[in-house]
Image (spheres, rainbow, N blue to C red):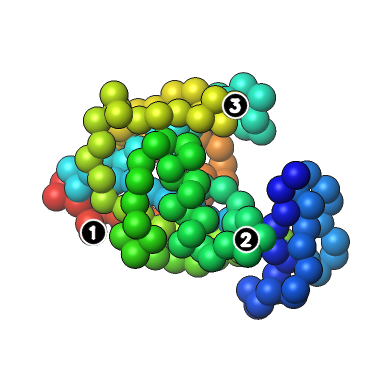
Amino acid sequence: MEYNDIYDIHRRPTGRVHKRGTPWAQGDFGFVVCVWVYDGEGRVLLTRRAPQKSFPGTWENSGGAVKAGETSRQAIARELLEETGIEAAEEEFQLLETSREGNIHYDHYCLRRDTPLSQIVLLPGETDGVQWATFQQVHEMIEKKKICRIIARQFRRQEPMLRARTKK
């Protein structure tokens, strides 16, 4: 059973927790973290969502819900390790932006790594594919609806910040 802290509209913890998989009450907000792993050469790491997940078979960046008691950086380090096997210290993640969509607060990070695909360890039931994709390939995947609309919106917003960190 997983629990998440409940936040108010201003991202302040309420002191209450939410049981994952149950509806959110009016005025309660969750907290999700996401990371774009980039190689500095114009590519980002994408994983494919497993068939039993929502948006099955679509590609995304790593991320997930912040568990009760976790900080944003603890959560993103945990999620990236769980979903890809990539280890990173909390201070290595660079905050790109914070946002809110509906009743979810987001912290969007980036992390520079050039990890060979052969070293990626996928989490069964979560992810079933991995690839390095150029910015152009990501746009093509968005057009073909191979990336879900939420991730597509986030990528379009954050692409300039990612491009500024790359050689190409």
Q: Secondary structure at mark 1?
A: loop
The quadrant of the image that shows the N terminus is top right
Q: Position of residue 89 (x, y in %)?
A: 34, 57
Q: Secondary structure at mark 2?
A: strand
- Of label 1 and label 2, which has the lower sequence position? 2
The amino acid pointed to by label 1 is: Ala
In this rendering, the count of numbered labels is 3
**Do the residues under discs 1 and 2 have CB atoms within 8 angstroms?**
no
Separation of residues labelled 1 and 2 (CA atoms): 27 Å
Separation of residues labelled 2 and 3 (CA atoms): 22 Å
The amino acid pointed to by label 3 is: Gly
Give the class, few, some or many, for how many residues have Cα within 10 Å of label 2's Cα (few <14, many ≥20): many
Separation of residues labelled 3 and 1 (CA atoms): 34 Å
What residue is shown with label 3? 125
What residue is shown with label 2? 31
Choose between 76 and 163: the one closer to the eye: 76
The amino acid pointed to by label 2 is: Phe
Q: Position of residue 44 (x, y in %)?
A: 32, 41
Q: Secondary structure at mark 3?
A: loop
Q: Is residue 4 left or right of residue 42?
A: right
Q: Position of residue 93 (x, y in %)?
A: 35, 59
- Of label 2 and label 3, which has the lower sequence position? 2
Q: Nearer the viewer, mark 1 or mark 2?
A: 2
What residue is shown with label 1? 164
Q: Residue at x 74, y 75 (%)?
A: 14
**Is 163 drawn above or below residue 73 in the view shown?**
above
